[in-house]
Image (cartoon, rainbow, N blue to C red):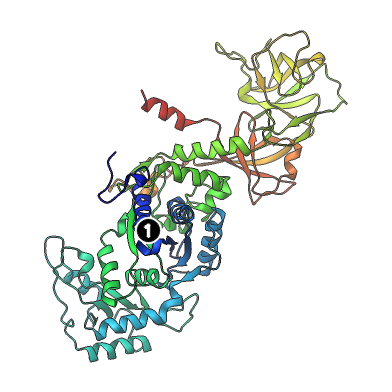
Amino acid sequence: MNTEPGISSETASLDFLRQRIRQDGLDGRFDGRVHTRFPPEPNGYLHIGHAKSICLNFGVAAENNGLCNLRFDDTNPVKEDTEYVDSIREDVRWLGGEWDDREFYASNYFDRLYAFAEQLIMEGKAYVDSQSADEIRESRGTLKEPGRESPYRNRSVEENLDLFRRMKAGEFPDGSCVLRAKIDMASPNLVMRDPTLYRIRHAAHHRTGNAWCIYPMYDFTHCISDSIEGITHSICTLEFVNNRELYDWVLDTLGIYHPQQIEFARLGLTYTVLSKRKLIELVRKGYVNGWDDPRMPTICGMRRRGYTPESIRDFCARIGVARAENLVEYSLLEFCVREHLNATAPRVLGVLDPIKIVIENYPEDQTEYFDMPFSSDGSIPGSRKVPFCRELYIEREDFREDPPKKYHRLFPGSEVRLRFAYYITCTDVVKDAQGNITELRCVYDPETRGGNSPDGRKVKGTIHWVSARHAISAKVRLYDHLFTSPTPGSREDVPFTEELNPDSLKTITAKVEPALASFSVGSRVQFERVGYFCVDPDSTAEAPVFNRTVSLKDSWAKIEKNSAR
């Protein structure tokens, strides 16, 4: 078996990141500790890509009897808000992350970060640059050409300290100057070409108010925060691989405790976008109905749609951890959701596209009740009483006036089983003046109560139903992919919003069994033979609302089968 240099055979079966952490433990590095952190910026809602990081950071800590911190990297007051802090906290806990008393904020360290910045100035490793942002950008150079040194690069330590303290005191307007590290303007790594450490922002911070008007940059803040908190393994996505050199430089130059940064491939998912900028555009321009729109890849959107934390954790485990970025089929996520709901969601009756049937030989004033279990095999405990009467609703697609071969549902002269109830036979079709079918006439066999025939006669078709007299009208939202393209935004000539799916949401009125009026918000159920649904927060007992979580059809299994051929 191939392993990385220095990796023992004991750890070779693990992914590369867990190999690294396990080997560090065997080598006694960090005194055998494992301490990770999940460090979101509170400037938006978390999405499925963040879920991968949450599961990874909290997961590897738990696997190694270690700790994981929740840290908010709140260094940009212009974009951050307590709304995002609250939502992040809720999402992480919903996914199973527990941080006890280890909730930290980069803003907790503003005084110490400022002191470290002054240390760099006094050691001649940082300077105040009075160039504009455009001038700094233009002088940074390219991959083929070195950058140009700032005309302010060789200011004295005393002048830099004075200017930096005046920046802190609020003497300068936004954008007039920045604090930069003095490293190497000819470095092949553009990140190391005198990166900005502090910038001026005259804006109130959601935690520190107006105490500060200068704020540290992410690259300066992140590594020092890791050091202060005693993090051992700073796990981040591949976009930060070039920043690792700066991470190391800051910590080594300051001479403080040094965690190890390790990068992994971020998640790419078909038929969606995970760019925070694009998600913000979808929300702000009204393409979706907020951050928790069930079509969004946000964790709160998936929760509202009915996805379970167990299924998302399963998905993250299945895709694994790798160095190379890849695009994951959305159908795999749906498979994980479907698999968990199949084992946990109670079965109930709901008809999405109802057509009425009248059982002509059933007493008009009679109602009887069938005790229906929430699962046929008893794996989901409980049952409820479902009313049955002369007039019922069935799915329109469960009837064909002129059926194709091997059609085993209802058609004129055919006999089918009503789930848990009776055998019925279609005797007549009622149509309106335009020839549309409005009603079906049937007869039932009273000897088949419970859906079984005492004479041993078999029927091939079983269909679901609801009592027309007792059914509740429910609003049902049917969701499809938000985009028509599996890779939205990948074409330079087409804005990603032009690839939005106009049929990503359809709202219909369905008929559901009366027991569903008592199901609480967030309850997940399977409408038998139809799909999995979740009670939406808009729902009331009088006017229930259901979101379709996922269909019964398993497209991932089909993909796997075809790829194996």
Where in the figure is residue 236, as x and y percent of width and height?
36, 58
Where residue 195 appears, as percent x and y from the top left, is 25, 72
Q: In the depicted view, which residue is nearer to us: 134 or 530?
A: 530
Residue nearer the viewer, 522 or 365: 522
| Residue 435 falls in image quadrant | top right
Residue drawn 78% across the image and 25% down it: 391
In the image, is residue 220 above or below residue 512? below
- Total numbered labels: 1
> Would you identify the image quadrant in which residue 533 lies?
top right
Q: Secondary structure at mark 1?
A: strand
Q: Quadrant of residue 443?
A: top right
Q: Is residue 301 visible?
A: yes
292 vs 385, left or right, is left
Residue at image point 56% right, 59% down:
90
Q: Which residue is mark 1?
A: 235
Residue at the outermost left position: 145
Q: Quadrant of the C terminus?
A: top left
Q: Residues within 10 Å of mark 1 (few under 14, many from 20)?
A: many
Q: Residue at x 86, y 23 (%)?
A: 364
State whether residue 304 is above or below residue 170: above
| Camera-nearest residue between 103 and 210 | 103
Is residue 202 in view from this perspective? no
Residue type at the position of mark 1:
Ile
Where does residue 522 sit, x and y in percent of width and height? 64, 48
Which residue is more in the foreground, 45 or 110?
Answer: 110
Residue at 31% over, 46% down: 490
Which quadrant of the figure contains the N terminus? top left
Locate residue 87, reporting x and y percent.
Answer: 54, 61
Outermost right residue: 365
Left or right, residue 25 beside residue 492: right
